[in-house]
Image: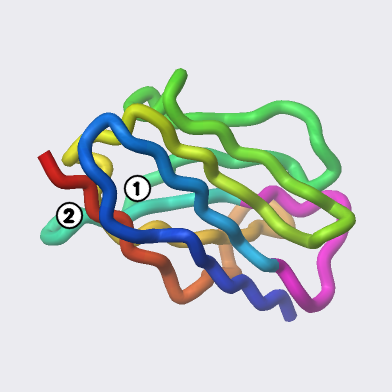
């Protein structure tokens, strides 16, 4: 079992920055892929970014490329999402997630990000 706890959300003006953190505990393996998803009011949950726990390639949604950076600190068992140049359309609940193989099966409770115009 894997537990994920997000933090770092809040209210920020357009153009501002935030860094989200995801504390990971429980049984994890180097083969896991860690990801961030978000869900805006009235919309479906969408992929934001992902990174292999063992390191390597990063993946981003087109809407956040060049503005968001995903990273992980294995020593701290933490995954981060650094967000710059935030836009009102980035508003939503951000979820940390993990997938052992092909499906994201572990999810955090989410943290709210609100970007004002």
Find disc 2 in the rendering and name its residue: 43
Find disc 1 in the rendering and name its residue: 46
Specify the quadrant that holds the C terminus: top left
Image position, residue 111 (x, y; %):
40, 66
The reply, left or right, for residue 112 in relation to residue 107 is: left
The reply, left or right, for residue 33 in relation to residue 60 is: right
- Tell me, for residue 1, which label it has, or none: none
Image position, residue 55 (x, y; %):
81, 37
Q: Is residue 56 shown in magenta? A: no
Q: Residue, x 52% and y 71% (percent of image)?
A: 108
Question: Eyeballing the image, is 115 above or below 55?
Answer: below
User: Which of 44 and 113 lies nearest the eye of the viewer?
Assistant: 113
Q: Residue, x 60% and y 38% (percent of image)?
A: 70
Image position, residue 35 (x, y; %):
57, 49
Determine which quarter of the picture holds residue 54: top right
User: Which of 78 and 17 lies nearest the eye of the viewer?
Assistant: 17
The reply, left or right, for residue 89 in relation to residue 112 is: left
Specify the quadrant that holds the N terminus: bottom right
User: Range of the magenta residues?
Assistant: 24-34
Q: Gap in Å between the C-alphas at discs 2 and 1?
A: 9 Å
Given contact means CB atoms under 8 Å apart, are the residues at marks 2 and 1 in contact?
yes
Image position, residue 59 (x, y; %):
57, 30
Color theme of the render: rainbow
């Amino acid at each position: 079992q894997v537990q994920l706890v997000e933090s770092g959300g809040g209210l920020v003006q357009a153009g501002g920055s935030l860094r989200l953190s995801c504390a990971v505990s429980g049984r994890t393996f180097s083969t896991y892929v860690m990801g961030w998803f978000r869900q805006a009011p009235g919309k479906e949950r969408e992929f934001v970014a992902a990174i292999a726990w063992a390191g390597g390639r990063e993946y981003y949604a087109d809407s956040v490329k060049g503005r968001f950076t995903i990273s992980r600190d294995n020593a701290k068992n933490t995954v981060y999402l650094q967000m710059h140049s935030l836009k009102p359309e980035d508003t939503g609940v951000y979820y940390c997630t993990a997938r052992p193989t092909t499906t994201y099966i572990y999810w955090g409770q989410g943290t709210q990000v609100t970007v004002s115009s």
